[in-house]
Amino acid sequence: MMSLPSYCRVMEKTQLQGNIPPEFFSLSNLQTVDARNNLLNGTLDIGTSPVNKLTMIDLRKNQISDFRKRAGVEKVDVILVGNPICQETGATGSYCIVNQTEPSSYSTPPNNCVATSCSDNQISSPNCECALPYTGLLQFRAPSFSNLENNTYYTDLQKSLMHSFMLHQLPVDSVTLSSPRKDSSHYLVLNLQVFPAGQDRFNRTGISSIGFELSNQTFKPPPQFGPFFFIGNPYLNFAGSLITYKELEEKLIILFLLSHCNISPFPLSSQPGEVTGSKKSSNTGVIIGAAAGGCVLLLLLLGAGLYAHRQKKRAEKATEQNNPFAHWESNKSIGGIPQLKGARNFSFEELRKYTNNFSETNDIGSGGYGNVYRGVLPTGELVAIKRAQQGSMQGGLEFKTEIELLSRVHHKNVVSLLGFCFDRGEQMLIYEFVPNGSLMDSLSGKTGIRLDWVRRLKVALGAARGLAYLHELANPPIIHRDIKTSNILLDERLNAKVADFGLSKLMGDSEAGHLTHVTTQVKGTMGYLDPEYYMTQQLTEKSDVYSFGVVMLELLTGRRPIERGKYVVREVKTALDRAKHLYNLGELLDSSIGLDITLKGLDKYVDVALKCVQENGSDRPTMGEVVKEIENILQLAGLNPNADSASTSASYDDASKGGAKHPYVYSKDAFDYSGGFPVPKLEPL
């Protein structure tokens, strides 16, 4: 460890053990020691000359039995909560107290000017100009400093923001930062205000450009702030709308006619050499009057024609808005026109603008359906736009199904559909933006998010609640038919959201209160597919339960359902021994789950997962029963099942760090395809 002088952080849960030598704290670039939840023991001694950059030592939940305080190191914030020194000796020092940080009073000061009194909801900028700023929250996941009262950090951040805005020629006059604080996830949160340049408010292009700058990670904050994300507030007070091309065309026509008709409010003056006299004057007056009258009549006719043309276009646009699927070509494979309930119709031009012409920097993923792009609405709201590609494996039917189903379901654990686009031959779906990607991405290490045992329980509960809502509360009930880790998304607080309803089916209620089955072509993803459905082609809600059971085992093992010819369900069933420690599953468990601590509720979790993957659907629980079981497991672990995921413990590691290869690395995309399968002739598994 002493040979690594470039370390600036030491992350938690790395199974460190033993005593930390005082010399460690003299590493030249050390800023923060974050070594929570390890096995470090003995006496903590940070020496007499720790490096000047060191601001915090967080050793919560280790085995530290004593702390040797030295003079001259008061600037270092030491946290030893959960160690024997605090639990057993009754020490009452500040290092045994976790400070719940209140917002700092910091706010960007004016730039050598006197702040003015503003009206109409405007705010005085640092340059003392009244304007309507674009506002939002900057959230930094892993800042290397703990002293929120050090204003130098925020000054550096402001300079960095303005440098980035100026570099990309954005219409920004100044920025303010205020109220730095830590939230329940230990993120550093700052209020951000961005003020417009040269006017008192932004136009739509300005807001979109700033949103792209902050949400696409184009802006790079100073290194001490670490990774961040931006949550923008809606911006509704746009600058005056620009004249449209059609309006400009009409104005130019009128100006052209006026100039060629030679109409003037002033009398025509006589030219040198012109013949004068009453007769000539009378003839001239008649000619001028006739010409003027003809031009006026022509203008009136053209005006009426333009008005009628505009009214016709407006009527066509209104009809298209009310019936965007007027050109939908119904056929046997995709059915009739989609039935909408509240989804907004976006034009192709709108989405092209919101995604910066579907730029590569906004391309955040792809699948059988097509590419997914990040977009920024004029209000500053981030959205995800799924754009179908020509020749995609999924087509009109999946597009129609998602619109019909997601436009009528609303639950915090189901991804929200905001709208769609059926324009210029394009099929696009617009969803709420879920920033932390899919559960599969997190389990594979792609996102850099490390899920401990508690967080995995919360994710399982959220996904189960979303499915239970679809099965038991939606009217009519919905069977998802493609539950897998890539179709479970994680929001900024790591709450799970069920997504991708392209293969879903509506079901009717039976007299017994359960969903009736439907005989249909087998569709789904191999590895998650219910063997009973595969063999009988009879789809019920218990098919989703089976798939969810596979997801539960995936959460437990970190392994893909089918890996190098091994099926995770069979592997767990074969290794299971309830009489042994960890049910004899130690070699199968994902090491990132936190095997150095007691996995409370593991036995009950495994039991629930194995009930879900029973061969016969009638032996599986309902999703409502699964929800209750997972809630009980969380309560046994001493946690509130109704709390957000981010309110529980979690850690974030750099995905690029070394270590053993993750199970996901071995299996590419062999089982990613979601679609139909031929009638089986052999047993599937």
Image: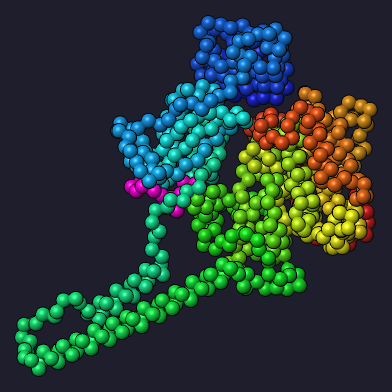
Q: Identify the residue at horizontal 48%, vertical 26% (top origin).
A: 104
- In which quarter of the view is residue 613 placed? top right
Judging depth in this view, the residue of 388 and 537 nearest the camera is 537
Rendered location of residue 153, percent (x, y): 46, 27
Residue range highlighted in magenta? 197-211
Q: Residue 23 vs residue 299: left or right? A: right
Q: Identify the residue at horizontal 67%, vertical 73% (top origin).
A: 329
Is residue 587 in view? no
Q: Identify the residue at horizontal 56%, vertical 48% (top origin).
A: 382
Q: Residue 222 vs residue 68: left or right? A: left
Rendered location of residue 442, percent (x, y): 69, 39
Q: Identify the residue at horizontal 53%, vertical 73% (top origin).
A: 316
Rendered location of residue 147, percent (x, y): 51, 21
Is residue 36 in view? yes
- Given the current orientation, which residue lies at the most extreme bottom position? 279
Judging depth in this view, the residue of 660 and 683 nearest the camera is 683
Judging depth in this view, the residue of 678 and 471 nearest the camera is 471
Color theme of the render: rainbow
Rendered location of residue 480, percent (x, y): 77, 54
Looking at the rendering, in which quadrant would you find the N terminus?
top right
Position of residue 557 relative to residue 352, above or below, is above
Position of residue 542 relative to residue 109, above or below, is below
